[in-house]
Amino acid sequence: MEENKLESIAILMNVILRADKIRDKSCLDLLLDILLMKVSNEDREKFVNVRVMAAKAIANIKDTSAVTPLLYCLNNKNEHYKVRLACADALGRIGDKYAVIPLIELVQDEEEKSVYLRESAASALGMLGDLRAVDPLVSILEAQKGIWSKFTFLKERIIEALGKLKLDNKRVFNALKNSLLDESPQIRINAIEAIMESESPLAAETIRACLRDKDDEVKKNALIALYNLIGREILDEVIEQDEYPDFLKMEAVSMIAEYENDDEFSRIRRNNE
């Protein structure tokens, strides 16, 4: 009996791989049947990867008729969390606005046992780019301010989502600016990138303060963001002024070598030897 199950799993995986290669709407019903297949509690774990593969293949077809079945799995709290994660990602990649409200409800659901699902919902909202997500996402970010815990990754995903929306919105900007004070270096890095993408006239000025962050990776990312915003002048400033640490000067020199011209790089290196 166990061998038959393993054989069935192998067959289903092969079917999904072939369907994913074709990526045609004619494959959709079959993939949805696999995603929605009923399995016993005993076999749940055995078939979970098959169903996750099906959700990913469904996302690649990008047909909006799949949204309702995907939402059904996403909203079923008795469903395996891996399947729900795959469905959230699929909803974001398909891009249908019908999924926005259910995803907002999930990311706001403090009773949801899996914080990973809330993270995945936040990422999906970023992919969807619907402005209805802005206030709920900012509210969560404001509520979690200063909390260093299992919510760290949720804050990261929310910041990424807000960055993708590219809004010059005062409340969004202030939430991102406050995130530059978070205890997590990765959250500060994500906030730098989101501010860079915000199209706010205050972006460069706000990120500039991060060149003095206590974490070297944060400083490095701030330099890259400032180069993208204001160009070569920030690299020259970092190289020439004594207030900046040597590692950041070398980062600026390396960026000139990579993005501008090698002759200039050689001149700067000689001057700094």
Image (spheres, rainbow, N blue to C red):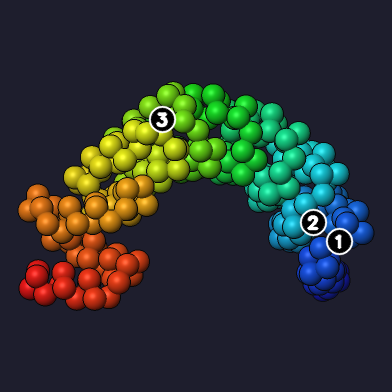
Alpha-carbon span between mark 3 and mark 1: 41 Å
User: Quick one: quadrant of the N terminus?
Assistant: bottom right
- Mark with earlier residue (2, 3): 2
Q: How many marks?
A: 3
- Whether residue 3 is situated above or below residue 234 in the rendered picture: below
Given the image, on which type of amino acid does mark 1 rest? Asp
Residue assigned mark 3: 173
Out of 36 and 206, give the one closest to the viewer.
206
SS label for mark 3: helix
Dot in front, 2 or 3: 3
Q: Is residue 212 left or right of residue 158?
A: left
SS label for mark 1: loop
Alpha-carbon span between mark 2 and mark 3: 35 Å
Q: Is residue 151 left or right of residue 101?
A: left
Dot in front, 3 or 1: 3
Given the image, on which type of amino acid does mark 2 rest? Ile
- Mark with earlier residue (3, 1): 1
User: Quick one: quadrant of the C terminus?
Assistant: bottom left
Q: Residue at x 41, y 34 (%)?
A: 200
Q: Position of residue 260 (x, y in %)?
A: 32, 67
Other residues around mark 3 within 10 Å, as few (<14) / some (14–19) / many (≥20): many
Q: Position of residue 106 (x, y in %)?
A: 63, 32
Whether pointer 3 and pointer 1 mark residues with C-beta atoms closer than 8 Å, the reply is: no
Q: Residue at x 32, y 48 (%)?
A: 230
Whether pointer 2 and pointer 1 mark residues with C-beta atoms closer than 8 Å, the reply is: yes
Out of 175 and 74, give the one closest to the viewer.
175
Residue assigned mark 2: 61
Q: Identify the disc placed on residue 24.
A: 1
Q: Position of residue 11 (x, y in %)?
A: 84, 71
Q: Quadrant of residue 170?
A: top left
Given the image, on which type of amino acid does mark 3 rest? Phe
